[in-house]
Amino acid sequence: MPNFIMHNEVSKMKDKTTKKLIFAALFAALTCVATMVIKIPTPLGGYIHAGDAVVLLAAFLLGPLWGALAAGLGSALADIVSGYVIYAPGTFVIKAVVALLAGWLLSRRFVKNQLAKSIIAGIVAEIVMVGGYLLYEAVFLGFGVAAAANIPMNAIQGAFGAVAGAALFVALSKTNYFKGE
């Protein structure tokens, strides 16, 4: 392969990586803001927020790996800035896993309709979020069975995030910025 062709391919890869990095940073910031803007307190000290919609949107638009990085960082940063530092490590892992799973599921061919597939991927990933916080609060924070009190609130947050994230994804995937991503 001639050197100039190889150089051009490397340049394209760098451009694509740079674009993904920039969008990941943007989605981390958007996740943080969406998590912090509207907060509805839950029984054990957590809160319901709109950040999960952006977590899923990042996974859908950036793919599993870049989406997981953006989701984990943005969500954990929101916990730190909002004074929920004790939740930050768990949030980082849980939201990264949510995005990783949602992005991976979206890439599978189980449903043709893009909206239906993204809603299903979001719901499955948000079920993992609910279970993740139950485990984190029960075991790592020491709440025991009392952690189950947050299941309904986390489920509401997850359902909203799945539907809103899917709707935003379908709308944004039609724009020039994300077509063919």
Image (cartoon, grey):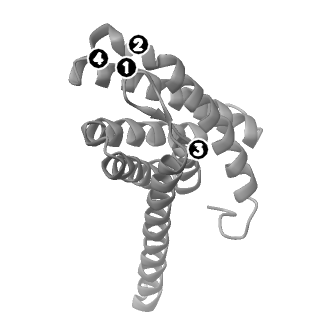
Check the image and report above or below for 113 versus 10: above
Q: Amino acid at mark 4?
A: Ala
- Looking at the image, is mark 3 or mark 4 earlier in the sequence? 3
Q: Which residue is mark 4?
A: 138
Q: Are marks 4 and 2 in contact (CB under 8 Å)?
A: yes
Q: CA distance from mark 4 to mark 2?
A: 8 Å
Q: Which residue is mark 3?
A: 53
Check the image and report above or below for 99 versus 172: above
Q: Are marks 2 and 1 in contact (CB under 8 Å)?
A: yes
- Looking at the image, is mark 3 or mark 2 earlier in the sequence? 3
Q: CA distance from mark 3 to mark 2?
A: 23 Å
Q: CA distance from mark 1 to mark 3?
A: 20 Å
Tell me which residue sits at (37%, 23%) in the image.
44
Dot 4: element: helix
Question: Residue 56's x, y, as percent?
Answer: 55, 44
Q: CA distance from mark 4 to mark 1?
A: 6 Å
Q: Residues within 10 Å of mark 3 (few under 14, many from 20)?
A: many
The answer to whether residue 108 is visible is no
Q: Which residue is mark 2?
A: 148
Q: Amino acid at mark 2?
A: Ala
